[in-house]
Image: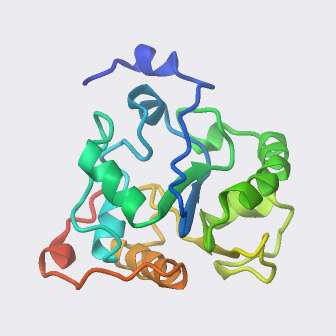
């Protein structure tokens, strides 16, 4: 389902539904949706993103999901059955998260806290420390578990899977994601040799 740049730009500011199964054990929080994700109505739709390869290598899912044309119903069912929720701090889509202003992040962060009580996850894992610091007024926060729980949920910051985050390898992502999944009560699948042969790509 190819889109031209102009067609994708038409999705700027639009949204896609949160994935919040009942129960949500692990709520994974991105910065904001990408344009392709909104176009196909599936989180982390761009193939170059390392999100699903990292979940697979971590043993959270049993294969690498390709959401570039939207979610396959079986893939969506697996995420829901495992108790994996996905949402974003900022609801509106942009071409890159860097297009968001600090004020937009702060405003969205103030509203985000109120959503946790309704979802009731065991663990909330934010993807990326820089956006977390701005959105939640925590300039000295570091990657890992945060000192305050939110409505009974552990709050963690883990590395962002974007290919622009060159500091974190696929192995680093998988290790961090596996840790929060275990904390959320998700039993990882046994490791496979295939998972460790994944091309990290851009």
Relative placement, left or right, of 38 versus 125 is left
* Extreme residue in the front direction: 22
Residue 66 in view of the camera: no
Relative placement, left or right, of 130 versus 107 is left
Picture coordinates of residue 183, whole percent (x, y)? 54, 84
Please name whichever residue, 170 or 78, is drawn nearer the observer in this view of the structure: 78
Residue at 37%, 52% in the rendered image:
49
Relative placement, left or right, of 163 versus 150 is left
Position of residue 6 relative to residue 185, above or below, is: above
Residue at 54%, 78% in the rendered image:
184
Q: Quadrant of the N terminus?
A: top left
Picture coordinates of residue 86, whole percent (x, y)? 52, 54
Please name whichever residue, 169 or 183, is drawn nearer the observer in this view of the structure: 183
Picture coordinates of residue 198, whole percent (x, y)? 20, 68
Residue at 47%, 55% in the rendered image:
164
Position of residue 132 relative to residue 168, above or below, is: above
Picture coordinates of residue 155, whole percent (x, y)? 69, 74
Position of residue 174 relative to residue 10, above or below, is: below
Residue at 30%, 63% in the rendered image:
53
Please name whichever residue, 163 or 198, is drawn nearer the observer in this view of the structure: 198
Q: Quadrant of the C terminus?
A: bottom left
What's the coloring here? Answer: rainbow
Answer with the quarter of the image where residue 158 lies.
bottom right
Give the number of callouts.
Answer: 0
Residue 35 in view of the camera: yes
């Amino acid at each position: 389902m190819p889109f031209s740049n102009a067609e994708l730009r038409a999705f700027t500011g639009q949204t896609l539904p949160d994935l919040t199964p009942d129960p949500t054990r692990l709520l994974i929080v991105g910065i904001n949706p990408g344009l392709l994700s909104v176009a196909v109505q599936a989180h982390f739709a761009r193939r170059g993103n390392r999100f699903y390869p990292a979940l697979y290598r971590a043993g959270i899912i049993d294969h690498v999901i390709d959401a570039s044309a939207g979610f396959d119903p079986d893939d969506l069912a697996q995420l829901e059955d495992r108790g994996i929720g996905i949402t974003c701090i900022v609801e509106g889509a942009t071409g890159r998260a860097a297009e968001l202003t600090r004020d937009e992040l702060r405003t969205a962060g103030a509203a985000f806290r109120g959503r946790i009580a309704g979802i009731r996850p065991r663990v909330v894992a934010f993807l990326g420390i820089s956006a977390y610091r701005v959105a939640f007024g925590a300039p000295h926060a570091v990657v890992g578990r945060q000192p305050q729980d939110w409505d009974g949920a552990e709050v963690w910051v883990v590395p962002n899977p974007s290919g622009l985050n060159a500091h974190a390898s696929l192995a680093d992502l998988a290790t961090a994601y596996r840790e929060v999944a275990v904390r959320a009560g998700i039993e990882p699948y046994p490791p496979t040799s295939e998972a460790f042969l994944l091309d990290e790509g851009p």
